[in-house]
Image (cartoon, rainbow, N blue to C red):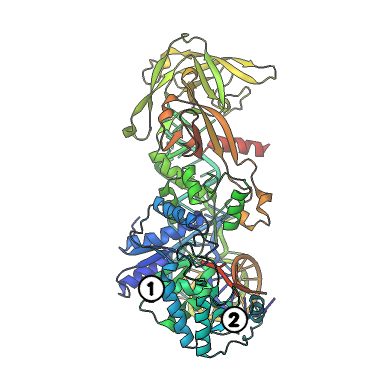
Amino acid sequence: MNDSEPRDFIRKIIYDDLGSGKHAEIVTRFPPEPNGYLHVGHVMSICLNFGVAAETGGRTYLRLDDTNPGKESPEYVEAIKENVRWLGFDWDDRLTHASDYFDRLYESAVTLIEKGAAYVDSLSAEEIREHRGTLTEPGTNSPYRNRSVEENLDLFRRMRAGEFADGEHVLRARIDMASPNMNLRDPAIYRIRHIPHQNAGDEWCIYPMYDFAHGLSDAFEGITHSLCTLEFEDHRPLYDWFLDQLQPEHRPRQIEFSRLNVAYAITSKRKLNALVEEGIVSGWDDPRMPTIAGMRRRGYPPGALREFVRRAGVTKKDKLIEMGALETCVRDTLGDTAPRRMAVLRPLKVVLTNYPQDQVEFMEAMNHPGNPNFGTREMPFSRELWIEQDDFMEEAPRKFFRLKPGGEVRLRFGYIIRCDEVIKNDAGEVVELRCSYDPDTRSGTGTSDRKVKGTIHWVSCQHALDASVRLYDRLFNDANPNAADDFHSVLNEKSLEIVAAKLEPSLAEAEGAVQFERLGYFRVDPQDSSAEAPVFNRIVTLRDSWAKLEKQALQGQ
RNA sequence: UGGGGCGUAGCCAAGUGGUAAGGCAUCGGGUUUUGAUCCCGUGUAUCGCAGGUUCGAAUCCUGCCGCCCCAGCCA
């Protein structure tokens, strides 16, 4: 991919601005409000803002939009920084806060008042709402709309001095109460809040609103392109209005793009919070969460996320992207980077009746069949082995080429075995297989080159490592849980299954993502795992065309 | 019913007057000691609909339809 080729409408605009000489350098910003965790939807914005600046040799600010104390907390700031860094981006010394500009913002508000472009309104919140009109009816002017500049100045100073209670007054832009654009019906720009600010402390009791603070912060930082999501599109006239009124040195341009939604995932902060609060998930970084923290803990590589949003593209069309597209990116990345190992998730014992009682052989196994640089390892092989329950069927269909009574299968990197006897418990469940192995078929060194259709994975019983493995599935049953009236009704009750697995011994040293052959990609849980009680998370399954066949067979019946 | 956006295959997405890229998914096939990977091949897309302009329209014009956003002293 040639990054110097514009590939979306925003990049086209930006590259044109560079080409025309309108800007010598591109400056962008990623401006999260520190009132929650970043999720998959934010990844788009992060990659766009940091990406386009990096491509063009520009700069990006990480700006915390902290204009509403009481709803925001420093707890989230660290998480946001960590998430952005983990995704692979760097803001250098450009970590800022909207609160850094409180003084300048205040001065700008005073300027607006002096120009007669803002006034102190003393209506209550309810009254203001009533005066705003509706979507189809114009609003009506506040009786305070024509206060003198002097009176406005005096009142605003006293608001700032703390002479009034919350809600007693509000500073409003004086635009047009009859505008068909609701945002232009004299929007509030400063409100009184007697709450200490997480950064500014007790210095202020009035705080600027988003529309006022955001565009001006952009201007103060010399942002050239202020990229945001579609819901701010009809705020743009207001964004431009403030710039027109105040004529800051730099004039940023706001451009909107559509949010990225992923099927089966929720991205509402409120709902995400409910999942945590209600204990439906274990926390903000629960591997089922669509948060960056969750995806990170799950084991999604940051490069896979970047690739995902690159493939999704930047447009203005509402999108709901299939989860499979994300999973493909994860598999693509991990396929190249994850060493292969063997693990049995649902163990079934196999006894090789003709294998010497106490013998142990060490089988050489490739760590990555597609890349010899990964080297090899040795796997202990013995008389008693664990295989996957799914790899045996007593009454197997035609195309099932794993183990069945009287049938043969290859043990990966081991021998070909034949199933001679099926042992069941009183309940009629298969609990053990008696098999015989063919000594001539040892992997690599076999004197027989006979082939069998199937190859299955295994772990030696006496050498196996016990581990708890968490199998994650989508959190919701509905492709668009965001649209559900109540997300509880579409929760997938089986989004987590925990199994007692048997791992090959080398997995004791596992770090990073590994592939459990034929099963999927897994990684040690960074929080809950210990040497005594290892815990693995399933990142994503492998593609499974057998499962697909089975499904089709079921549907065909 | 006011304003702002958006409508190209199942999901994304190029294309901006010359006869519909690409990715994901799907479905075939080949390779394979992972039913993975890899490799080949695979799409009757009424380009939302209807008119119009033009030799020629996804692209221009008109009218309609559908979906999303806006009535916080949230962002």
Closer to the camera, A205 or A318? A205
Q: Amino acid at mark 2?
A: Pro
Closer to the camera, A435 or A88? A88
Picture coordinates of residue A208 (x, y %)? 50, 73
Closer to the camera, A391 or A159? A159
Q: Where does label 1 land, which residue? A: A220
Q: Amino acid at mark 1?
A: Phe
Quadrant in which the N terminus of chain A is drawn = bottom left
Q: Which mark is residue A251?
A: none
Secondary structure under badge 1? helix
Q: Quadrant of residue A146?
A: bottom right
Mark toward the start of the polypeptide (2 vs 1) = 2
Position of residue A306 relative to residue A237, above or below, is above
Output the chain of dot 1. Answer: A
Between circles 2 and 1, the one closer to the viewer is 1
Closer to the camera, A149 or A211? A149
How dense is the environment of label 1, judged by Cα within 10 Å: few (below 14), some, or many (20 and up)? some
Picture coordinates of residue A300 (x, y %)? 46, 45
- Residue A271 in view of the camera: yes
Q: Where does label 2 land, which residue? A: A180
Output the chain of dot 2. Answer: A
The residues bearing labels 2 and 1 have C-alpha atoms spaced at a distance of 30 Å
Picture coordinates of residue A76 (x, y %)? 49, 55
Q: Which residue lies at the image location 34% right of the left edge and 64% below the top edge?
A: A59
- Residue A208 in view of the camera: no
Quadrant in which the C terminus of chain A is drawn = top right
Asked if residue A274 lies left or right of residue A306, the reply is: right
